[in-house]
Amino acid sequence: MAFTLHYASGSPYSWRVYLALEHKQADFSTRLISFDAGEHKTREFLAISPRHQVPVVTDDGFALYESSAIVEYVEERFPEGPPLFLKDARGRALVRQWVSEITSHVERPIETLVDEIFYQPDVAKRNRAAIGDARTALAVELEHFEGRLSAPWLLGQLSAADFTLYPFLAMFPRFELRERELGLGALIGPKVREFMRAVEALPYFDRTYPPHWRT
Amino acid sequence: MAFTLHYASGSPYSWRVYLALEHKQADFSTRLISFDAGEHKTREFLAISPRHQVPVVTDDGFALYESSAIVEYVEERFPEGPPLFLKDARGRALVRQWVSEITSHVERPIETLVDEIFYQPDVAKRNRAAIGDARTALAVELEHFEGRLSAPWLLGQLSAADFTLYPFLAMFPRFELRERELGLGALIGPKVREFMRAVEALPYFDRTYPPHWRT
């Protein structure tokens, strides 16, 4: 098949693109990249992803990385599917504004938690101040979203913004498996919870769920 | 005038949008926001920029922040001007890939330098390790760009990617005014230098130059 998503299980950036492709009813195949097995460091992978990052899409000789750029490409590449952006220029701009806000304000504290919790199995060696700052930053953002989203979606209709936010929030229980007292779940208000349930009720959601989270 | 850019002098995000608007030969006015005078904290400004950030554009009752979203909006809003993106879907995708890469890999170390140098006038209180890490990250990126750009532009023709990168690089001498030994200028190779000169030779460049840097 010409269009392939190269992704990693549990990568929120991969999940964003996977949801977008399913939403567009795109004809695509997937290739699961195992970081544990070093598959992101092969010469073959480096040729399509010079920074060794996932996701990457390949499309008949064309390779593209950076998930927000991929989602825009998916929108253009599969025009017959349901839209990922609003129809008029102002609506599209607001979707992109949300995507950028989530990148600036949610992605960064999540990356801190990934570094401090996923990559530091020794609880005693974790940087408590960094974890505390990340939790505070997420608390501010989640309160902000709670007040701004037009339930169940961020922008009145399902869009690329929803697929950008959801995978980060879905990681909260994964952090708490490794650090019970983190209290991230308590930050999620009723409207954000409703948003998460709406994503989880999408007919294609199960197919996109990170394989290694099932076990 | 209906379309207004609200910007701050020296803000690389503002400069990116200013260059994009000039490139599109857009009909717009500017409003300089003084952070020193607290103009970003007025109720009037908060109404258009809930995070108190610049740039913001207002367009006949519509307000938009987040510079990468604004540049996309400018491209759509002024379709008659020279393009900010490449013509086909793959070309547009590559511009967006570059913009995301610059956001992930250049913006973050630059923000560290802003925090540690601009906002910490006492040299002795600056976090040397953080400054060193930021410099190393920028060295890696600049070597990467040196090898990848198709001189003088990042992508073979002038695009939004160039306007995203240039303002960050133009800050190097500003950091070095406050910390002479930083050695950021030495990180810029001949192709990146040629790229910077090409931006500086644009006929509208001088109009966009940060007002307070002239003195």
Image (cartoon, coloured by chain):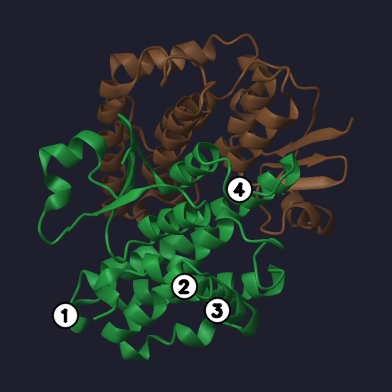
Chain colours: A brown, B green
Amino acid type shown at disc 4: Arg
**Tag 2 or tag 1, which sits nearer the N-term?**
1
Amino acid type shown at disc 2: Leu
**Tag 4 or tag 3, which sits nearer the N-term?**
4
Same chain check for tags 2 and 3: yes
Same chain check for tags 3 and 4: yes
Q: Which residue is mark 3?
A: B197
Q: Nearer the viewer, mark 1 or mark 3?
A: 3
Q: Which residue is mark 1?
A: B122
User: Gap between marks 2 and 3, in whole Å?
Assistant: 11 Å
Q: Which residue is mark 4?
A: B96
Q: Is residue A35 visible?
A: no
Q: Chain of mark 1?
A: B
Which residue is located at x 19 percent, y 77 percent? Answer: B125
Q: Nearer the viewer, residue B106 or B59?
A: B59
User: Gap between marks 1 and 3, in whole Å?
Assistant: 33 Å
**Tag 3 or tag 1, which sits nearer the N-term?**
1
Which residue is located at x 27 percent, y 70 percent? Answer: B211
The quadrant of the image that shows the C terminus of chain B is bottom left
Q: Which residue is mark 2?
A: B169
* Residue B135 horizontal/vertical position (percent): 45, 76
User: Gap between marks 3 and 4, in whole Å?
Assistant: 23 Å
